[in-house]
Amino acid sequence: MGFSANGKQCLLPEEALFLMECGNVQVFYQGLPFSIQDGYEKFLSVNSISFNQYLVYGHLKRLGYVVLRFNPSHQTEMPEEEPGCKQEVKHKEWWSPADVSTITESSSTTGSCPWDFSSIHFPDVGSVLRFHSKDAASLTPPDPSLLPGAVTVGPCDIALWRRRVNLKEIRMSHSDQRKEDEKYRRKQDINKDPEVRRCRTWSEYRQLMTKRRSDVGGRPAHLWDREVKPLHDPAQAIPHEELLEKISIIKSTNLLEGASRLQPLDDWRISFSVFQPDSVSSFKKSSPGRPYVRMVVCSFDGPVPDLSALKQLSSQSPEVPLVFAAVDHGDISFYTFKDFHLPRDVFP
């Protein structure tokens, strides 16, 4: 704690008051000793540090944290990412460049894939009939031409696996069997549908499909007769991702998005940079490094930070988490806001 100025060792008001409470420093003014009550009255003010800020400072110091006043000039800003730019991730390729060029040349020469998948036969290890054959206890090795050069595979013994597999026939109830048959019937070839077979032209088939869709419900016409209409017309076929984006009510955003265009704040500011205790960090006054968190002190009686305040404060500390210390008559509660992603059913 403290700093050097004009060849003297000085203390900030909160540091002097904290050391007075610990019994490590005695302060004199005009030859008379300061009491702790005098320290609270003289050291804490709007221009230096408020009472709530000192309560948070003292609480963190007693927990062993290193607490310094926040200095905006000491922060390291993260460069903003240009729109459409993404970080490249280096990864190890399975194939060597020679192998890739060989496959590419072969594909471009023949005009098709270099592998003949029709000649690759996959073993049937689950068939009951196979278990009665003589070679049922092992699988023959694969064709060496299908394997990398340094890999050799011998016969595979499946006797142990065969004893563990459950070959018992599944017996379903009549209702479950009926549901399974109905599901299978829906997946059958559409050309086996008698009504479809009676269609003589493509327009007749489209009329049949339109009639079936209207029979099951279709689009309620009365919803489109009003001034306020649904977000999407089910008659318009669009990709799922575009549909989810169209009907979404909550739009995704980032705390740093648009923060540079906001006006400076008067009521909110970052008070402290907090470093972890000496037991888990190597803090040095000459080179403090990146803080553990940065602290914003507020009161339960005061206003709640809105989105504009959150964006402004986050832009001042883009690389360090921001924590709000809310003081309620001496009780301190800590809150933080973190980015999160809503789950998506469809990905691009």
Image (cartoon, rainbow, N blue to C red):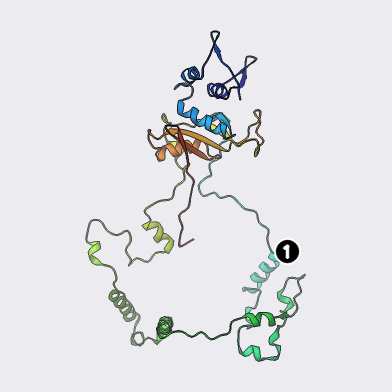
Q: Which residue is mark 1?
A: 98
In the foreground, 239 or 304: 304
Query: Residue at the location (48% across, 85% down)?
Result: 171
Report whether residue 168 is seen: yes
In the foreground, 112 or 59: 59
**Residue 230, position in %: x, y?**
29, 60
97 left or right, relative to 83: right
Q: Quadrant of residue 194?
A: bottom left
89 left or right, relative to 198: right
Q: Quadrant of residue 238?
A: bottom left
134 left or right, relative to 254: right
Name the quadrant of the N terminus.
top right
Query: Residue at the location (45% across, 32% down)?
Result: 330
**Residue 93, position in %: x, y?**
68, 60
Report the label total: 1
Report whether residue 119 is seen: no
**Residue 307, position in %: x, y?**
41, 40
Q: Residues within 10 Å of mark 1 (few under 14, many from 20)?
A: few
Q: Is residue 142 above or below residue 285?
A: below
Query: Residue at the location (63% across, 80% down)?
Result: 164
The amino acid sitting under disc 1 is Ala
Query: Residue at the location (37% across, 86% down)?
Result: 193
In the foreground, 167 or 147: 167
**Residue 329, position in %: x, y?**
42, 32
Q: Is residue 3 above or below residue 118?
A: above
Q: Is residue 252 above or below residue 45?
A: below
Q: Is residue 199 above or below residue 26?
A: below
